[in-house]
Amino acid sequence: MHLEKTIAAISTAEAPGGIGIVRVSGPEALLIADRVFKAKNGGSLSEARGYTARLGGAFTQDGEKLDDVVALVFRAPKSYTGEDVAELSCHGGLYVTRRLLREVLASGAVPAGPGEFTRRAYLNGKMDLAQAEAVMQLIGASGEQAARAAQAASGGALSRKMRGMRESLKGTAAQLAAWADFPDEDVPEVENKPLLEALEGYIQALSALLRGFEQGKAFREGVDTVICGRPNAGKSTLMNLLAGCSRSIVTEYPGTTRDIIEETVLVGGVPLRLADTAGLRETEDPVEQIGVQAARERMGTAQLVLAVFDSSQPLAEEDAALIETLEKTRSIAVINKTDLPSSGIQQKIEESFAHTACISAATGQGLSELEKAIGQVLGTADFNPAAGILSTERQRADAARAKAALEEGASALKMGMTLDAVTVCVEEALSALYALTGENAAEEIVDEVFSTFCVGK
């Protein structure tokens, strides 16, 4: 990356809006902005103090006025990128914003690549790699918990946790090295039992971190969820309850739902990508047969299944077959129609499923019980977004590598191998933890991280 170049890009969405922002960053950011922007008070941005704003207009090189503009000035190193930055805010029409960017580029800036502003912040020491990744997590957050977790990571929660673990592990590595390299000096002997306890403590901490990744993943990426059951069990009514609108057609006639109806909803802060499927039964209707087959296929790939049972009716053959099908699937039995007289099937269903919820999809009664069951089965019930969690596969892989190295070191110690072998494992774990926050990340890894960013961020 050529930090001596000044970059520019549109930093607002590529859609009409209240304002459009063109961001310029680099050693000539203010000089280039001055070639486009003319302040009403006659002052130049190059002479302006940091954290100040100027009202004026943007003009083409031929002197034609493009729009009224507010210019913000940020001076290095106290800016997002750590460089001089100018942000030009115009009215949010697509043509005006793009034309403003074109004039900035014609005045000497070069187009920014994906994530290049944040990458410069990383290279200039404004944030580490884990914090940079949290920026995109925050932009893409679809719920409160995901946003809070991204905000915590952006503020350095994960980085501080990794730094503390690294410092402690460095102490262990230093003790091992001193004992090995200076056996004749007055160096405290490394005792196996305290060393093993220390290694196992690190392993437990990394195991908890890896579990948190799976919890956070549900909030970040959502969960493919299928609603299934026999006809008229209340699947479409449940779909509409969770969606908060009439998303699926509900009638008293079996087989109404034939195609898969999809909707993404937030339940307990977790985005569920819901699929309402055709009722599971044997049918002579060729169109309904296609729907039933699609439902069975979708169940096989779902991350979570909400199996709906009609509590007012005895269990049918279709219900028994569904229970058997879901024996090894992550699922919740939804015992529906509790507002009607019970047929006494609840005990049988509760014996067959680890997680159940009794609801009336028609009235909404019991919805909180279903939300609680979903949190339990997904492991999100005790999720703490402020704790500092792993948020990307890259981070997860580095944490897993550190854990595997420490497990190998602990195993070597138990087998009576020399401390040199343990030292190698500890050093490998340290390398992985440094890579996690980007302090010794290869350039290809950095390239890959920022390639996922949007242009302008």
Image: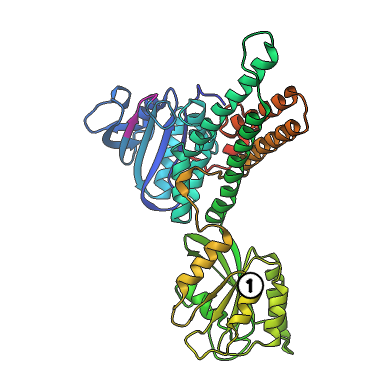
Q: Which quadrant would residue 144 be assigned to in this image?
A: bottom left
- Mark 1: secondary structure: loop
User: Can you say whether 132 is above or below 386 in the image?
Assistant: above
Q: Which quadrant would residue 279 be assigned to in this image?
A: bottom right
Furthest residue toward top: 184
Residue 80 picture location, percent across and down: 41, 32
Question: In the rendered image, which residue does mark 1 sit on?
Answer: 353
Q: Nearer the viewer, residue 108 or 448?
A: 448
Q: Is residue 20 magenta?
A: no
Q: Is residue 87 left or right of residue 420?
A: left
Q: Is residue 360 left or right of residue 353?
A: left
- Tell me where the magenta segment starts and ends, as one range: 72-77
User: Residue 258: in sight, yes or no?
Assistant: no
User: Residue 344: in sight, yes or no?
Assistant: yes
Residue 240 picture location, percent across and down: 49, 76
Residue 216 picture location, percent across and down: 54, 51
Q: Colour scheme of this structure image?
A: rainbow
Residue 136 picture location, percent across and down: 51, 44
Q: Amino acid at mark 1?
A: Phe
Q: Nearer the viewer, residue 197 or 255?
A: 197
